[in-house]
Image: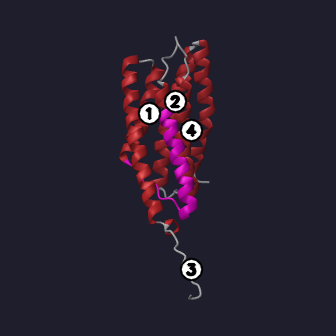
Amino acid sequence: MTTANKITIARILFVPFFAVLVLYYGDTGSEIYRLGALLLFAVASISDGIDGYLARHYNQKSKLGAVLDPLADKLLLVCGLVILTFDNRPYLEPLPLWLTVTVFSRDLLLLIGLVVIYYSCGAVRVRPHFVGKIATVLQMTCVIWALLKWDAEWLIIWSFGAATATIISAVIYIRSGVKQLSASPSSVASHATKTGEGR
């Protein structure tokens, strides 16, 4: 249990508190809840950079961290997208439902793909693509933009950009997964030869 992993676990524990704060703000309109949600989201985002720095520069990379780090990011981000899709007006402008469905569908497809590749190949090689990173940044922008209650028209523009980048990244990762499956010996069809007595 490295320091980097402890920070990652703390990010995971932030998720229910973040969800409760946003829900309470949507119900009561008390600014303390909105500010608390923004603070938690900011701390989680900063800690993501910190645990990554510790893992890279202090030799704290581990198999546990390789699983927990992306899980922590996804839990917080998807939680924010789902809750902010609820109609919390007049306090918060909701995110478009199609954005949340797009992000959730991509992550579900990638999760299924990872399981299939793992059981077929015995190992999974995941190489982050810059389009995937752009998609994540745009998704985070949508969450922060909504919580800051900035211009609703720009929120739609950010949402469209996030959905587009999410779809493109899904195509890239699916193609990468197909290549891994194709290169695996387990994907090669076995040809059984039948022998019999001569006529």
- Where residue 17 sits, quadrant-wise, is top right
**Dot placed on the residue nearer the N-terminal end, 1 or 2:** 2
What's drawn in magenta, residue-wise? Answer: 101-129
- Where residue 64 sits, quadrant-wise, is bottom right
Residues at badges 1 and 2 in contact (C-beta under 8 Å)? yes
Figure check: 102 above or below 193: above
Residue type for callout 3? Lys
Q: Which residue is mark 3?
A: 194
Q: Going 60% across and 47% down the picture, which residue do you hit?
A: 6
Asked if the stretch drawn in magenta spans residue 110, the answer is yes
Q: Give the distance between the C-alpha atoms of the residues marked 4 and 3, in whole angstroms.
A: 53 Å
Image coordinates of residue 191 in percent, x first then y, are: 52, 74
Q: Quadrant of the C terminus?
A: bottom right
Q: Going 54% across and 79% down the picture, which residue do you hit?
A: 193
**Dot placed on the residue nearer the N-terminal end, 4 or 3:** 4
Image coordinates of residue 158 in percent, x first then y, are: 38, 27
Asked which secondary structure carries label 1, the reply is: helix
Q: Which residue is mark 4?
A: 75
**Dot placed on the residue nearer the N-terminal end, 4 or 1:** 4
Q: Give the distance between the C-alpha atoms of the residues marked 3 and 2, in whole angstroms.
A: 57 Å
**Relative depth, front residue between 63 and 190:** 190
**Dot placed on the residue nearer the N-terminal end, 2 or 4:** 4
Q: Quadrant of the N terminus?
A: bottom right
**Relative depth, front residue between 44 and 198:** 198
Res. 139 mark:
1
Overall secondary structure of the magenta section: helix
Q: Is residue 66 visible?
A: no
Q: Which residue is mark 2?
A: 81
